Image (cartoon, rainbow, N blue to C red):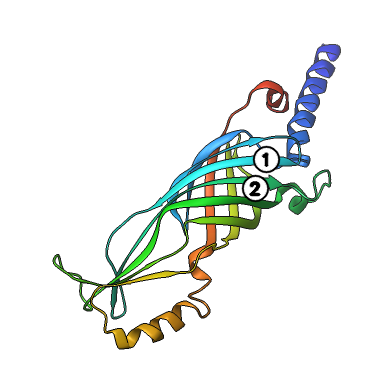
Amino acid sequence: MKKILIFFVAVFVSLQVKAQIWEEYSSFYPAVGIQVGARGVGLEGSYPLSNAFNVRLGASIFPSSKMKLGSRVFEINRSDVSLLADWQPLYGKGSWIARKWIVSLGAGYFFENKYERYVGARKTADQKLDYGVEWSKFRPYIGTGLNGIRLAQRFNLAVNIGYYIPTESTAIKIYEKDPVDIPELREDLDSFPYNLAPGVNVQIGISYIFFKNNYNKYFQ
């Protein structure tokens, strides 16, 4: 009986050690999940290339509808696909931040990336467009974040903050706006924070972790 008890204790300790190996070092998992943030809502898949490197492919869309803010009625149309590579700089160290902190590089292509302002301060069905602003579509990306925050055995939370760098000048299309106001509009778009806001990415994602191949041994 004593030998059986020792055997089960040894098995339990072994399984606990295996479960900690993955958490102690790498923040990357093979996973697919949903994301929400400045780019709207979308799907994202990730796959580790090694212990400290990961690749992500995602697509997002900003739900299109008229919005009212103060005396302005506007609409934002955004949809994109992004390919990102993640690096875990402190891989191998035991602190919580070392196991979660990542740096990301990549690029995104925005099929739509525009802001349209409507005439008037109230939303109406036949409302005329005042002017439209279109931002560059292809954008290199640099960012950082936290990954591998375990919500449950198979669910992962990630938080990413970064910037999509513009590669083209902002384009303005005029519909009803008085031409006298155009220089002021251009000055506003080229000044902080309006010139930075279109590229800012703040994103929260929840993903489902797939265990396969050599990943299984960490979650026996």
Residue 126, label in figure? none
Q: CA distance from mark 1 to mark 2?
A: 11 Å
Query: Could one spot residue 41 in this view of the protein?
Result: yes
The residue that disc 2 covers is 147
In the image, taking residue 219 as reference, residue 1 lies left or right, namely right
Residue drawn 20% across and 70% down? 123
Q: Which residue position holds label 1?
A: 54
* Secondary structure under the numbered disc 1 in the rendered image: strand
Left or right: where 110 falls relative to 27:
left
Of circles 1 and 2, which is in front? 1
Element on which disc 2 rests: strand
In the displayed orientation, state which residue is furthest to the left. Answer: 126
Q: Quadrant of residue 217?
A: top right
Q: Is residue 131 above or below residue 157?
A: below
**Residue closer to the observer: 72 or 5:** 72
Rendering coords of residue 88 (x, y %) = 74, 47
Q: Amino acid at mark 1?
A: Asn
The reply to whether discs 1 and 2 touch (Cβ–Cβ < 8 Å) is yes
Q: Residues within 10 Å of mark 2 (few under 14, many from 20)?
A: many
Residue type marked 2: Asn
